[in-house]
Image (cartoon, rainbow, N blue to C red):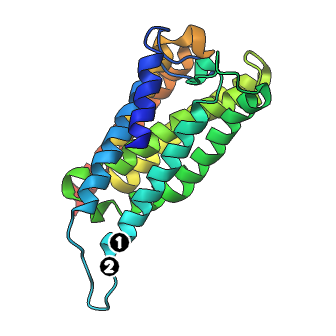
Amino acid sequence: LGSTLGYLLIAYSHLSRGGLSGPLCPRGIEFLLFVDAVFACVLLASLLFRDSRKHSDGRDDSDVTKKWAFQCEYLRLLRMAATLLTPCALGGATADAGVPDALVKAAPGVVALVGLYDLAVAHEALWQRRNMLPAYWHFSPALGKGVLVLDVNRMIGFYLFSEGSWWWLAWVAFALSSYVFSTWLMMNKGRSFAYYLVMLAGYMGLLLDGATSGVPPELPGAAGMLSGALIVCQALKKEDTKKGE
């Protein structure tokens, strides 16, 4: 509930400013962050009131799943708190708060580090256990992973690189390539359409906000088409495999 309210505050406070902006920041990401927090809050509530699923050896799968779900929520709350300390364009609320400059400069790095751990450990573990979630919530970990990828990459881009430099362009190319590859991987491993839809929203957001995101519009357009082509080829390959069997 805390992260849901926090990201609602971020989204609402930036509506009058035209939304979040900055390097590699797709238009509308504040709403993706809020929607992800809402779904996570409802998922936690459904897990809390769900019956335990114990094995004959006494092991309780539901408790392990709850542990990872709660860890994802704690990390999301930490990311949200650190985001409030970032520069205003990234979602911060520090313009008139008297926050020390050193803390404002370090905050995007903190968000990125927490997000990387969440992506590689907590959300990955929850995604691997998605079949242990209620049937109508199997999509939630993939949705969370997609939002994390977009959020972490914009924070890393802002924290480490000067916009317009060769290093910046190299980072943009790497980030978009990672979007394409991770989409293919998630679809190949678990048909995670929620992840693909988040990435698609990211491509569209970068196309619409190219002037402030610092990303040439041709790059997200090409990445989006490549992602779609890979998914279509993957589906056709699986269809041919089924016919061959």
Q: Residue at x 61, y 37 (%)?
A: 82
* Quarter of the N terminus within the rendering: top left
Residue type for callout 1: Asp
Instruction: Give the x, y percent position of residue 205.
Output: 45, 19
Instruction: Give the x, y percent position of residue 113.
Output: 65, 46
Q: Are marks 1 and 2 in contact (CB under 8 Å)?
A: yes
User: Which residue corresponds to mark 2?
Assistant: 60
Q: Nearer the viewer, residue 71 or 176?
A: 71
Q: Is residue 16 left or right of residue 244?
A: right
Q: Can residue 187 be seen here?
A: no
User: Which residue corresponds to mark 1?
Assistant: 63
Instruction: Give the x, y percent position of residue 107.
Output: 68, 34
Q: Give above or below for 156 relative to 75.
A: above
Residue found at the very far bottom of the displayed protein:
57
Q: Give above or below for 67 relative to 12.
A: below
Q: CA distance from mark 1 to mark 2?
A: 6 Å
Q: Residue at x 20, y 70 (%)?
A: 51
Residue type for callout 2: Asp
Q: Is residue 114 left or right of residue 15?
A: right
Q: Nearer the viewer, residue 122 or 128?
A: 122
Q: Nearer the viewer, residue 177 or 7?
A: 7
